Amino acid sequence: MHYTPFEPPPLLRNGFLMTVYTALWEGQRWQATVPLPDPPCQTAVFKGMDDVPLWGWYALPQTAAPAQENVQRQSQASSQSPAAQPSTSCPGTLISTYGITGSLADQWLLSLLARKAYHRGFGIVAFDWRAHGKTAELSPTLTSDGLFEGYDFVHIAAQAKARGCPPPFWFVSYSLGGQLALWGNKAAEDKAVRQRLGLADGDIGGAAVICPSLESNRSLAYLEAHPLGRYLERAMTQGLVQQAWRIHAAHPNHVDPAAIARATTIRGFDQELVISRLGFASTAAYYDATSPLYFLPHLTRPTLIIYAEDDPIFHPSLVNDLGAIAAQNPALDLRLTQYGGHVGYLSSARFQRAMGDPDPWWAWNRLLDWCDRQSQGPTTPVPPAPGIESPLD
């Protein structure tokens, strides 16, 4: 198996510790690590598939060069990381959402991404996906783990273009949001939908995801059986239940409170509230139908997947499956690392300097480098077939 070089601080060479440390510590201090102003955002209510309202915001790209981060990156960049140089032209627009629970109001990773991307010249769109955040206040429509959310990405791209956001559009996210973004890349191959929405063939560039959910049956069983995994699964379940109660408060006739009370696990949540509305007889069938692993071999648009072997959320066997698929599909660019945890990827101070990065957020820097580089070349489909130091340094 080929690994992409990545070096975390010594104490974070454990996926569970990296995951928990990033969420609990870096989530409180991330603004100090990315001392850039927030983009000048405009709020919007986009229309997704079947006209489901999706609340979000967008920021048109800067017309001037992103001076602050440009200077910092140029002064730190080494010959080992030529791709780290920011583009002086607009590299397109990122369309992003988040993972299994939360809202735009509390997803600091998206705020971090928005600061960095905007100051590298990207346009930015972020949205609360179905049944989340302010979108849940607008509509009682529940989640489908990509079946409809993939088309939501494409619909948002068309509306963002009409509002002045420049193509190519890059579908970007992490964790379960990464699953949705991959579904967006799949939906973008529907030529009839693109034409109906007024999107040209090259308007959607592709997808770039960090630690995406790829196969739910194996990974959920893995979480349920592992002592540390059960801790993470309970935390995610609590977030889902809180989310369901918020939907019930906004739309009391659409969500059964007794079903919410019975949903004590992730699997139970989907069993009680999701699968029957989508026509699935079991959660197993639902997870098979929504897992991106099975359509990755057929994607034709450029797709970056950053994935950690020690991710404590997903079944370890997926590493080999993902590697085998990426080896056969030239549209997939897999950056597999030995360490990183679940959407952690904090660089050691030494590795940050070696990469010429302005901050310790290795995966986000690589994702932006990749989107920037891809936007300079063709974005048409292809035939399938390497700041502020962490206290741990």
Image (tube, rainbow, N blue to C red):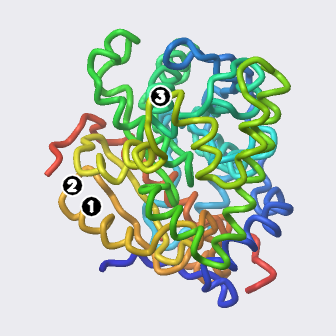
Q: Which mark is residue 326?
A: 1
Real-space CA distance between mark 2 and mark 3, rounded to the nearest whole angstrom:
25 Å
Dot 2 crowding, Cα within 10 Å, few <14, some 14–19, many 20+: some
Q: Position of residue 2 (x, y in %)?
A: 31, 78
Q: Nearer the viewer, mark 1 or mark 3?
A: 3
Disc 1 + disc 2, Cβ < 8 Å:
yes
Q: Earlier in the sequence, mark 2 or mark 3?
A: 3
Dot 3 crowding, Cα within 10 Å, few <14, some 14–19, many 20+: some
Q: Position of residue 100 (x, y in %)?
A: 64, 48
Is any atom of residue 365 visible in this view? yes
In-image side of 153 versus 110 (left or right) = left
Dot 1 crowding, Cα within 10 Å, few <14, some 14–19, many 20+: many
* Residue designated by label 3: 148
Give the structural element (helix, strand or loop) at label 2.
loop
Give the structural element (helix, strand or loop) at label 3.
loop
Is any atom of residue 387 visible in this view? no
The amino acid on which the numbered mark 3 sits, given as a three-letter code, is Phe
Q: Which of the pair 144/304 is nearer the observer?
A: 144
